[in-house]
Amino acid sequence: MENSKFKFILASASPRRKELVGHLKVPFEVMTLNVPEESNAADPVEFSSEISAVKGLAVYDLLKNENPDSSFFVVSSDTIVCHQGKIYGKPNGRDEARKFLKELSGNTHSVFTAVTVKVLHQGKEYGYSFVEESRVTFDHITDALLERYLDTGDSLDKAGAYGIQGPSLTFISRVEGDYANVVGFPLSRFVRESEKFFQQHFSQEELWLNFF
């Protein structure tokens, strides 16, 4: 592979994903399109994968049509919470956030984050995807503590109505697996998968991050 640089595009408006990807210390741009984030899948892996793919493909197709000879590395992601077969996305308001948290209170649930990568290089298309699962345990959330948390507004833009890096730590007792995955982007898994991808397709001994 020539020493041409890939343009790293993060197809997500999440400030948490932006911060996590920033730890890679490579230049990247944020680009999102307004696409329906819907899936009929009952399986949480399929559900998150479908939505992640839709987000990324919309951005990828636009870039490919506008600049077919360029090299793009488009990364999209979607995070959901699942408990007892029920999938929790972002709540539509305070009342639904309260309902979500009451159902999760005192229980252990799973957090699934799907990552989709679409690559264009020299007119050829590549891609890979994966889903990471972590487990989070909540203490029993008293009504008083729940209302105090809801007052912060932290729950409204996050799957499962909570963000692990904020005031919800007042009732999170245990995390099993990748902490960054619960934040919204499994960074260490992404690094491993990306390194494997570059070695497989471009036979590079050089660190894959140097291509951005």
Image (cartoon, rainbow, N blue to C red):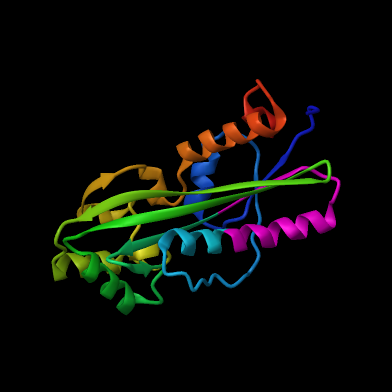
Residue 28 vertical position relative to residue 155 in the rendered view, above or below: above
Outermost residue toward the top?
205
In the rendered image, residue 72 lying in the magenta stretch gets the answer yes
Outermost residue toward the bottom?
95
Q: Can the viewer see residue 95?
A: yes
Q: Nearer the viewer, residue 211 or 169?
A: 211
Q: Quadrant of residue 1?
A: top right
Q: Quadrant of residue 102?
A: bottom left
Highlighted magenta segment, given as a residue range: 53-76
Q: Nearer the viewer, residue 196 or 145?
A: 196
x%, y% of residue 198? 65, 32
Q: Nearer the viewer, residue 161 or 130?
A: 130
Q: Quadrant of the C terminus?
A: top right
Q: What residue appears at the point 24 percent right and 65 percent down from the top-left corner?
A: 104
Q: What residue appears at the point 63 percent right and 57 percent down from the top-left corner?
A: 56
Q: What residue appears at the point 74 percent right and 59 percent down from the top-left corner?
A: 61
x%, y% of residue 52? 55, 59
x%, y% of residue 127? 65, 47
Q: Is residue 139 left or right of residue 190?
A: left
x%, y% of residue 189? 47, 39
In the rendered image, residue 118 lying in the magenta stretch gets the answer no
